[in-house]
Image (cartoon, rainbow, N blue to C red):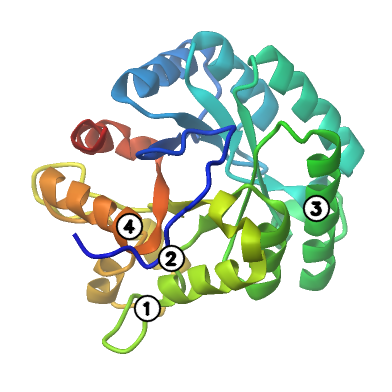
Amino acid sequence: MPEPKWIQTSAYDRLVTKGFRFGVGVMRGNSRTKLEDSARRAEALGFDVMHVPDHLGGPAPFPVMTVIAMATSTLRVGTFVMNSAFYRPALLARDVAALRDLSGGRLELGLGTGYVEEEFAAAGIPFPSARERVDHLRETTEYIAEHLPDVPIMIAGNGDRVLRIAARSADIIGLTGGDRPAGADEDPLADRIAFVQQAAGERFGDLELNIAVTAMPLDGSGMPDLTIPRHFLPGLSDDELLRHPGVLSGSTDEIAERVRGYRDTYGIGYVTVQDRHAEAFGKVIALLK
């Protein structure tokens, strides 16, 4: 195996630090029975965390996470990610503390700036500027870290200011893989990790690096449905999307080897997939754990 470019040299004492961690998102939460079944199935497949997004029109994060936690015994719950601009830090901290206690400490909090202007309008909340949203993310992160230091914080993003906040204050860095695939002379994912490493300084070894997968094969064809990555990366061709770190293709064995490469080359040990990928990715987990 190639020598790792980055090695996490010190333990992050609240999370598993050896081997991999795997997360799966949940997009629907309108049926308690179905949600409980999905959570138990994810736990049985070897997933470590079940994530809930934070969008108007989607499931309400805290009630859904509570059902997941109550239905399982080891599965952690988390947000991927909270729209921090929707919340005052102290009020968010109250809900976080309650679920931390109800789940037996199995909560990790993912935070983001919020980016869908239409959701702010629907909520009757003025849409802040990008700078204001990033500033509020920083304030929220610092408040949660100070008042609830036992709750792991993830910050996901790609921009310099967001990654700088994550490097200095978060426990988990959610990487998007960059806005383009690696080429002959550049590696956007490596560049972003190098930026985080420089911004984090001595605490870099305590950070957990995460990559979010938006597409992977669901059958024996080896080809993923590229609908989601096309939406978020409209400037890339299909060939370029297939080379993007957030897109997996090939057989189960080939995907497992690529995920090993994320760890060995970049130090990424935490991989998150979408709920529709759960069964297919469960076969990959079986090869990696």
- Judged by depth in the image, the label closer to the viewer, 1 or 2, is 1
> Could you tell me residue 126's position as x and y percent?
87, 59
In terms of secondary structure, where does tag 4 sit? Answer: helix
Q: Residue at x 52, y 16 (%)?
A: 31
Mark 2 neighbour density, 10 Å: few (under 14) some (14–19) many (20 or more): many
Residue 176 point in image, percent of width and height? 48, 62
Q: Which residue is mark 4?
A: 262
Report if the CB atoms under discs 1 and 4 are less than 8 Å apart: no
| Lower position in the chain sequence, tag 2 or tag 3 | 3
Measure the alpha-carbon separation of dots 1 and 4. 13 Å
- Residue 177 - label: 2
Which residue is painted at 72% across and 62% down in the image? 165
Classify residue 231 by image quadrant. Answer: bottom left
Task: Tell me if mark 3 has few (under 14), some (14-19) or many (20+) residues whose alpha carbon lies within 10 angstroms of its own.
Answer: many
Q: Quadrant of residue 252?
A: top left
Q: Nearer the viewer, residue 128 or 140?
A: 140
Labels 1 and 3: the sequence-earlier one: 3
Q: Which residue is at the front of the view, 5 or 180? A: 5
Residue 116 can be seen, yes or no: no
Q: Of label 2 and label 4, which has the lower sequence position?
A: 2
Amino acid carrying label 4: it is Tyr
Q: Amino acid at mark 1?
A: Asp
Compute the Cα span from label 1 to label 2: 9 Å
> Pointer 3: what residue?
85
| 1 vs 3, front mark | 1
Q: Nearer the viewer, mark 2 or mark 3?
A: 2
Q: Is residue 148 above or below residue 2?
A: above
Q: Earlier in the sequence, mark 1 or mark 2?
A: 2
The answer to whether 136 appears left or right of 199 in the picture is right
Q: CA distance from mark 4 to mark 3?
A: 31 Å
The three-letter amino acid code for the residue at tag 3 is Ala
Q: Give the CA distance from mark 2 to mark 3.
A: 24 Å
